[in-house]
Amino acid sequence: MRKYMWIVGLSGILLSAAVLAQDKQGPGQPGKPPDPLQQIELETRHLNVQAHQDEVNFQRQMKELQVEKQRAELEKIRQPARPPMSQCPMRCHRGMGAFLMGCFLIHILLAVWVYQDIRRRNAGSGIWIVVTLLIGFFGALLYAIVRLGDRQS
């Protein structure tokens, strides 16, 4: 029984070595070099396949670029034209600051007018100055209405 096992084992090893040797030589006859015409034909086919793959890759990249271009154009259409964010707040703050400064100056001038009128007439109280400072034009208008009412009586 041991003899048969040795024989089967050795024949398996020799058979697998023969198959591996045939695979390395290629699909031609063993020991014979490949035909130069077949070799050129294989290289030509390989180059044609490579050229086709390059063309497909090029077309894919061109389509991607076109899609990106269209996407950028759509973004321009969707977003309204406006100045960059770095410029807008500065302009808005300057305008708003000038407006608030003007309002503050008007409040002060109206309060000075009310103060001078109270001193000149020796009538009224200092509460009207505070009201004019807080409310502004409407406080001065209210003081003028009350003052006109005092004059008639």
Image (cartoon, rainbow, N blue to C red):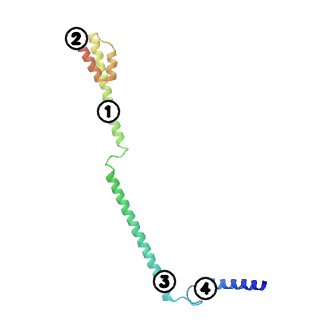
Residue 68 is left or right of residue 113, and the answer is right
- Marks 1 and 3 sit apart, C-alpha to C-alpha, by 82 Å
Identify the element where label 3 is drawn: helix
Residues under numbered marks 2 and 1 in contact, where contact means CB atoms less than 8 Å apart: no
- Marks 4 and 1 sit apart, C-alpha to C-alpha, by 94 Å
Give the crowd class for mark 4: few <14, some 14-19, many >=20 residues within 10 Å.
some
Mark 2 or mark 1, which is nearer to you? Answer: 2
Q: On the image, numbered disc 1 is attached to which residue?
A: 98
- Disc on the earlier residue, 4 or 2: 4
Q: Which residue extends farthest front? A: 1
> Which quarter shows the N terminus?
bottom right
Q: On the image, numbered disc 2 is attached to which residue?
A: 151
Residues under numbered marks 1 and 3 in contact, where contact means CB atoms less than 8 Å apart: no
- Disc on the earlier residue, 1 or 3: 3
* Closest to the observer, 79 or 40: 79
Q: Position of residue 98 (x, y in %)?
A: 32, 32
Identify the element where label 2 is drawn: helix
Q: On the image, numbered disc 4 is attached to which residue?
A: 22
Mark 3 or mark 4, which is nearer to you? Answer: 4
Q: Position of residue 138 (x, y in %)?
A: 28, 23
Q: Which mark is residue 42?
A: 3
Position of residue 50 relative to residue 37, above or below, is above
Q: Position of residue 40 (x, y in %)?
A: 48, 85
- Disc on the earlier residue, 2 or 1: 1
Q: Residue at x 41, y 72 (%)?
A: 55
Circle 1: residue type? Ala
Circle 4: residue type? Gln
Give the crowd class for mark 1: few <14, some 14-19, many >=20 residues within 10 Å.
few
- Marks 3 and 2 sit apart, C-alpha to C-alpha, by 117 Å
- Marks 3 and 4 sit apart, C-alpha to C-alpha, by 20 Å
